[in-house]
Image (tube, grey):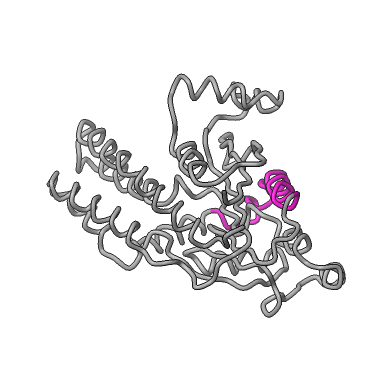
């Protein structure tokens, strides 16, 4: 399965009305965190837009429009900003972005971007084949080639932007697709549980390199005085769990600090840590992302500026 096919299926599974409405509170809070500091940002690129379930497009457009254009939004049920928008949506899946815009009644420019460069390669297929054959050296070679592919990409666009909005995709790129392939191989008895653990660790060892490259590509898209608002999925819980209760009590940061001390730095946390090595944080928040059923993921939002 190609990178595009994987994310297309993922977006399609989350593209229904039920999911969109379940995420209403999360979407409103995430958008409010963005628009609080968005004044003065004349050009914006959204990374990982997908179905646009995470973000209120009309609110984002309104926050970035001048006074003469805001009235257009209030007077129309479907507003086309293709020619004069300051916002560009991006994702590997163009159809998902189209669904999201249609659902929210706002048309914006879109850029289809493969953030890893893996969609046009056969590396995922090579990884699946190596698992089936049980060739450890081939698995290592493929993982190294994947990292090199991500690191070697040219700039995703020809433009630089005042603001990048990066939705929660750090743990999805690279790792989640490989994990799904690995899980399938385990369920179908193509690999043993021992091999599963060993290969999973090999993948995890490569993820920091991928995150470093991904973050570097993000920074290359910013103007010299640009800003970044970025969201990382950091911790999962169930409704009524200890972390869920801490969030409701507005003491989530304290609970997360204890979690971090006990279990260490997860992939999302590393994404924040790496970016803060290069940029300065000036605001942050925690959000509750209701994925499905009783599951919820806690997302950290961070506003950063170039140092």
Extreme residue toward the bottom, this view = 83
Give the magenta part as a residue range: 14-36
Quadrant position of residue 242: top right
**Residue at the spot x=71%, y=26% of the render?**
250
Q: Closest to the observer: 13 or 86?
A: 86
In this rendering, the count of numbered labels is: 0
Image location (x, y in percent) of residue 151? 34, 57
245 above or below 225? above
Q: Is residue 252 left or right of residue 154?
A: right
Q: Is residue 278 left or right of residue 5?
A: right
**Residue at the spot x=59%, y=65% of the render?**
161
133 above or below 43? above
Image location (x, y in percent) of residue 186? 26, 40
Image location (x, y in percent) of residue 257? 55, 23
Image location (x, y in percent) of residue 240? 63, 25
Q: Magenta stretch: residue 23 in it?
A: yes
Q: Magenta stretch: residue 46 in it?
A: no
Quadrant position of residue 262: top left
Quadrant (top left, top right, bottom left, bottom right) of the N terminus: bottom left
Q: Is residue 254 left or right of residue 63?
A: left
50 above or below 140? below
99 above or below 188? below
Q: Closest to the observer: 53 or 231?
A: 231
Magenta stretch: helix, strand or loop mostly: helix
């Amino acid at each position: 399965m190609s990178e595009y096919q994987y994310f297309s299926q993922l977006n399609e599974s989350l593209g229904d009305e039920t999911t969109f409405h379940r995420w209403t509170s999360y979407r409103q809070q995430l958008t409010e965190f963005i628009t609080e500091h968005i004044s003065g940002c004349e050009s914006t690129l959204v990374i990982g837009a997908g179905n646009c379930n995470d973000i209120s497009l009309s609110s984002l457009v309104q926050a970035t429009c001048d006074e003469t254009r805001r009235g257009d939004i209030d007077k129309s049920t479907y507003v086309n900003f293709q020619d004069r928008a300051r916002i560009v949506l991006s994702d590997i899946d163009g159809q998902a972005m189209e669904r999201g815009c249609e659902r929210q009644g706002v048309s914006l420019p879109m850029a289809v971007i493969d953030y890893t460069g893996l969609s046009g390669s056969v590396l995922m297929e090579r990884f699946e084949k190596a698992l089936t054959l049980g060739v450890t050296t081939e698995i290592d070679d493929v993982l190294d080639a994947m990292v090199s592919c991500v690191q070697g990409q040219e700039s995703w666009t020809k433009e630089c932007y005042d603001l990048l909005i990066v939705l929660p995709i750090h743990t999805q790129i690279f790792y989640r697709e490989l994990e799904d392939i690995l899980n399938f191989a385990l369920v179908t008895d193509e690999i043993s549980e021992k091999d599963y653990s060993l290969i999973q660790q090999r993948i995890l060892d490569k993820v920091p390199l991928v995150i470093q490259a991904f973050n570097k590509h993000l920074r290359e898209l910013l103007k010299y005085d640009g800003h970044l608002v970025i969201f990382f999925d950091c911790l999962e819980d169930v409704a009524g769990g200890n972390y869920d209760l801490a969030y409701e009590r507005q003491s989530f940061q304290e609970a997360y600090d204890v979690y971090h001390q006990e279990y260490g730095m997860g992939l999302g946390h590393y994404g924040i840590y790496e970016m803060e090595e290069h940029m300065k944080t000036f605001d942050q928040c925690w959000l509750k992302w209701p994925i499905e059923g009783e599951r919820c993921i806690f997302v950290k939002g961070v506003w950063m500026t170039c140092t």
